[in-house]
Image (cartoon, rainbow, N blue to C red):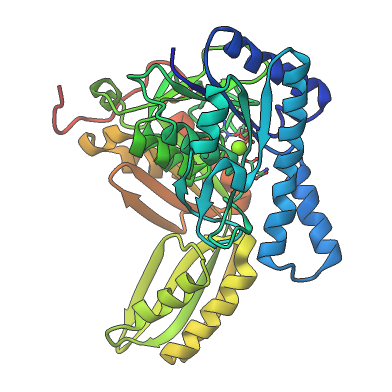
Amino acid sequence: MGLVVQKFGGTSVGDATRIRRCAKRVAAAREDGREVVVVVSAMGHTTDELLQLAAEVSTSPGRRDLDLLLSTGEAVTAALMSMALRDLGHDAVPLTGGLLGIRTDRGYGSARIVAVETDAIARHLREGRIVVAAGFQGTAPDHSITTLGRGGSDTTAVALAAALGVREETGGVCEIYTDVDGVYTADPRIVPGARRLARISYEEMSELASLGAGVLHTRAVLFGQRYEVPIHVRHSAREAEGTMVVRESIDMERKAVVGCALTPDLARIAIRGIPNRPGVQGTIFRVLAEASLLVDDIIQNESADTADIAFTVAADRLGDVKIAAERAAAEVGAIGGVSVEVGLAKVSVVGVGMRTHTGVAATMFESLAAAGIRIANITTSEIKISCIVPKERGAEALAAVHDAFGLGSAAVPAPARVSATV
Ligand code: ADP
Ligand code: ASP
Ligand code: MG
């Protein structure tokens, strides 16, 4: 039997009892004769509490300082999990950032993994130990601690699994244990009628995750896809089937939409009166990229020889975005200034079957219209359609769309098919 990587999220390791309960699951896999790497998140709301503490100490905490602080949350759980495993009679070793061999760039706060050096982990496994990895962290070239972005312990788990050769062929698996028993057709906290999916493709899962389905970190899914790591999302306190995130299969093509997601809090920035000469768009978005700001959809309107450009961003970095947008507006000589609109949300539907079905957009727009919800903007890609809606109607919009595609029931009505796949 292959190696298993088991990752336990914050709620699952929220107190001593839960840590001991998760340790039993780890021990059971080891007693089954498997090699086990455990990845743990910080306990409960520790990461939020550490962020709050930093905000009380400093009005502008340094990003490197913050990463060192935040990484301690996962270190605490790793040490406790190792203790719990030893109590159950297993040899275990807790490893943090550098010791784990996870090398990243210097992008404190959302660092990218550039290499995983598995020598130390492999040696511990060979020597019969359970490796307990502190999730969410790595080290930069200067050995300083970095973190991978909120929810990043999933990415630690899948990256370690990929580097350790976890593949379907080798019988390995990366298990993500959380507080829900799998991936649902929508966040079950927002849409109570949502249904668990037995399987979902990497492509659909990464799209849903990036659009707000927080059950998995987007980059974890992308790692899984690139290295074909089977990812099994499961409930940490229940023996239930869960959801397998796997390669796309023909069977999955039958449904136009497999799930929907909500990005609950967006803002829209507009830069007006831009002299529309070649290169201005590049200048504006280069300034934002240099500040490591992620921009969502972009709309440009032209009038005479000027243009207005509006783009949406996550509301949590609005302050930084506004500063960068003002700098960009000055650089291109925009005469209309910068304006900010808050209170937006985005509802999206996702499915690889959209490539071969028509009517998906119409169904989505009609369902929002029937609920009396105004659409502020629409964006599409090959496998998703997103609508920007007023924030206060976000949850309602998600439920309406979920209903329109019949996602809560096992039989999903498919819009007309235009090209057949076998
Ligand atoms: P963990 O701490 O274990 O990493 P998260 O809070 O990050 O857990 O992710 C689990 C949560 O993701 C669930 O409680 C659920 O509310 C939310 N969620 C959002 N979208 C989905 C979805 N499509 N399917 C399942 N859970 C989802
Ligand atoms: N503790 C980190 C967070 O809360 C990472 C994680 O839990 O995945 O975002
Ligand atoms: Mg998570």
* Image quarter hosting the C terminus: top left
Residue 331, can we see it? yes
Residue 370, can we see it? no
Of the pair 194 and 46, the residue shown nearer to us: 46
Question: Residue at 31% across / 26% down in the picture?
Answer: 255
Name the side, left or right, on which 220 lies relative to 177. Answer: left
Residue 301 lies, with reference to residue 48, above or below; the image says: below
Residue 276 lies, with reference to residue 88, above or below; the image says: below
Q: Position of residue 74 (x, y in %)?
A: 70, 40
* Image quarter hosting the N terminus: top left
Question: Residue at 72% across / 51% down in the picture?
Answer: 70
Of the pair 303 and 324, the residue shown nearer to us: 324
Q: Position of residue 368 (x, y in %)?
A: 46, 43
Question: Residue at 56% across / 34% down in the picture?
Answer: 215
Residue 79 lies, with reference to residue 372, above or below; the image says: above
Residue 377 lies, with reference to residue 167, above or below; the image says: below
**Quarter-of-image position of residue 67:** bottom right
Quadrant of the rendered image holding ligand 2:
top right
Of the pair 255 and 282, the residue shown nearer to us: 282
Q: Position of residue 300 (x, y in %)?
A: 36, 72
Report the residue that reaches farthest toward the right: 56
Q: Position of residue 58 (x, y in %)?
A: 81, 68
